[in-house]
């Protein structure tokens, strides 16, 4: 946006959307930036309805970390034992920062938005890790609200807005894959699910742990959690751009409504 476009948007609807995501493995079939890409798309679609602006996604964040005897470490649920318990550094994941760094950065971002004149801040987390990531996001929000109660702050994940749709607590499965297919179809390739030690072997020449895991695991997917035991959220059979568009439109419409309601409640005078 040009500066005059930002000024006009601020005058019309002082709402600022912040998409959160991380650079994390999302299976062989999806781009590592899935979390941030879907959160950004949701925020853009909501802003088109509510007014306001969308700032660039934040790609780094805190998460659980396990330090290993050899000096390396595992981060996030997939490496630490989520999915089928991979227990190695899955290719592509490189998002970890200290919780205090992440929390302080969020506080500074919120303050920058408040200083600019936004009366509503909407934070959409595309990464759902419950042990460190989301608690840090919520703690920073609580600290900011204590200091600036006049600024309305909404913190949520994209799936929280659609409890009535089939979008379970998953990782790289049918729901998330569908959203990415709707937003960036070029970043989804479902034919690659079992290609780690086949056509992709040369690409992983420096990733012996990943090749070994593919050879050893009896599971169809590496680092994937469907959130449904009945096969109703398997990405290869249930993911589609149509499903993704339905999720995106519903999430964005409900998010925009929440943002406009908060703006109506916000005090007109800025501190």
Image (cartoon, helix red, strand yellow):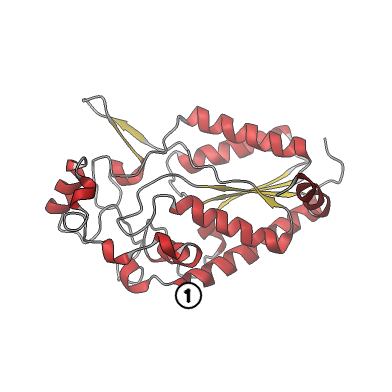
> In the shown orientation, is residue 229 left or right of residue 149?
left
Query: Which of the image's four quarters has the C terminus?
Result: top right
Q: Residue furthest left?
A: 216
> In the shown orientation, is residue 210 left or right of residue 252?
left
- Name the residue tied to disc 1: 242
Q: Residue furthest right?
A: 269
> How many numbered callouts?
1
Residue 50 versus residue 147 in the image, above or below? below
Mark 1 burial class by Cα count in 10 Å: few <14, some 14-19, many 20+: few
Q: Which percent across, then down, holds residue 197?
A: 16, 54
Q: Quarter of the image holding residue 110?
A: top right
Asked whether 242 or 65 is in front, the reply is: 242
Residue at image coords 32%, 73%: 237
> In the shown orientation, is residue 109 left or right of residue 229?
right
Q: Quarter of the image holding residue 248?
A: bottom right
Asked whether 144 or 251 is in front, the reply is: 251
């Amino acid at each position: 946006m040009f500066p005059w476009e930002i000024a006009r948007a601020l005058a019309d609807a002082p709402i600022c959307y912040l998409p959160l995501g991380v650079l994390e493995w999302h299976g062989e079939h999806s781009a590592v930036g899935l979390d941030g890409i879907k959160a950004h798309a949701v925020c853009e679609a909501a802003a088109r309805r509510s007014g306001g602006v969308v700032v660039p996604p934040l790609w780094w964040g805190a998460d659980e970390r396990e330090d290993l005897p050899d000096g390396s470490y595992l981060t996030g649920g997939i490496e630490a034992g989520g999915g089928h318990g991979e227990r190695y550094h899955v290719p592509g994941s490189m998002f970890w920062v200290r919780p205090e760094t992440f929390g302080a950065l969020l506080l500074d971002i919120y303050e920058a938005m408040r200083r600019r004149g936004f009366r509503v801040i909407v934070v959409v987390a595309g990464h759902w890790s419950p042990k460190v990531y989301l608690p840090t996001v919520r703690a920073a929000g609580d600290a900011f609200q204590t200091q600036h109660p006049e600024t309305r702050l909404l913190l949520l994940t994209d799936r929280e807005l659609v409890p009535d749709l089939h979008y379970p607590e998953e990782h790289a499965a049918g729901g998330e894959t569908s959203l990415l297919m709707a937003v960036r179809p070029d970043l989804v390739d479902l034919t690659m699910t079992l290609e780690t030690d086949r056509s992709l072997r040369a690409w992983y020449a420096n990733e012996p742990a990943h090749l070994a895991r593919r050879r050893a695991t009896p599971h169809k997917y590496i680092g994937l959690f469907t959130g449904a035991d009945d096969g109703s959220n398997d990405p290869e059979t249930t993911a589609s751009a149509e499903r993704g568009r339905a999720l995106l439109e519903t999430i964005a419409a409900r998010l925009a409504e929440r943002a406009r309601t908060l703006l109506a409640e916000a005090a007109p005078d800025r501190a």
